[in-house]
Amino acid sequence: MCGRYSLFANGESLAERFGFDNFADLEWVERYNVAPSQSVLAIVNASTGNRAGMLKWGLVPSWAKDPKNGYKMINARAETIDQKPSFKKLLKRRRCIVVADGFYEWKKLGADKQPYRFQLKSKEPFAFAGLWDRWEQNEEVIHSCTIITTEANAVVSGIHDRMPVILTKEAEVAWLNRSIDDEAYLKSLLMPFSDGKMESYQISSLVNSPKNDTKEILNSL
């Protein structure tokens, strides 16, 4: 699964890297410990090009009676994304990317858990594959998203058997292209990222609490 990540890259560099021009409209702050139910930086493709926005992490389907139940859907499995009612229609018409520069997983050590950070060797920001939806009831509107997961690559597998789908730059373009609706092709993009381009290291247990959102989390042990 993917339940915690970071994004502290410079805002202007993110706008240039991911091709959106509305950064000034966003309520953006650097984050070191992003957690479910919080707002996350996501990008969709609009008629005028890529557009960034803040989505609630934890998908609330448009048909949900109670939005609180939706917040449990922080992840969607790539293998069954075209089968689950909550995700099937979104795969064709409401795809997004969630921007990050690292994510965290925990390795069980007896009764304890040791947190690890995973990032690109280049230290560059990257894109998780995601889906989004719009829920509205009694004048309340929630725009939310889920992050898609797949089998872990060799870097992650020693810690966890799942990892978030990190899209290549070429796959990002296809994933956001709204004219593409071939489910088989879209699923083919949801593969484990190249382990040769990733690295990991042990980090502080400060990351265990979402209340801790400081760069000290990144300190290696």
Image (tube, helix red, strand yellow):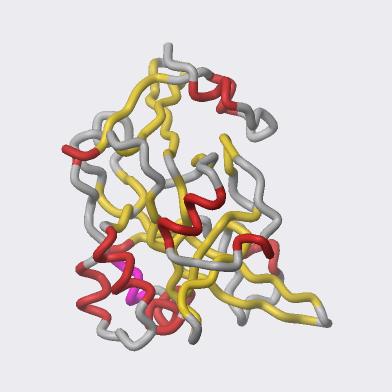
Residue placed most toward the observer, 186 or 169: 169
Q: Residue furthest right?
A: 138
Does residue 153 appear in the picture of this structure? yes
**Against 99, is 66 above or below?**
below
Residue 55 visible? The answer is no
Give whichever of 196, 187 is nearer the camera.
Answer: 196
Residue appearing at x 33%, y 72% in the figure: 175
For image coordinates 34% across by 88% down, the residue present is: 179
Residues 25 and 75: in front is 25
Magenta residues, dominant SS class: loop
Rendering quarter of residue 65: bottom right
Image quarter (top left, top right, bottom left or bottom right) of the C terminus: top left
Horizontally, is 59 left or right of 19 in the view? right
The x and y percentages for residue 21 are: 54, 67
**Is 104 displayed left or right of 137 in the figure?**
left
Give, as a single range, the part of the protein colored magenta. 79-83
Classify 181 as above or below 120: below
The answer to whether 164 is drawn above or below residue 32 in the figure is below
Q: Is residue 35 above or below residue 148?
A: above
Residue 81 at x, y percent in the picture: 35, 70
Q: Residue at x 39, y 17 (%)?
A: 109
Front position in the image: 165 or 108: 165
The residue positioned 39% from the left and 77% from the top of the image is 91
Residue 167, given in percent of the width and then of the height, sits at: 30, 58
Labels in figure, total: 0
Residue 204 within the segment the image draws in magenta: no
Quarter occupied by residue 128: bottom left
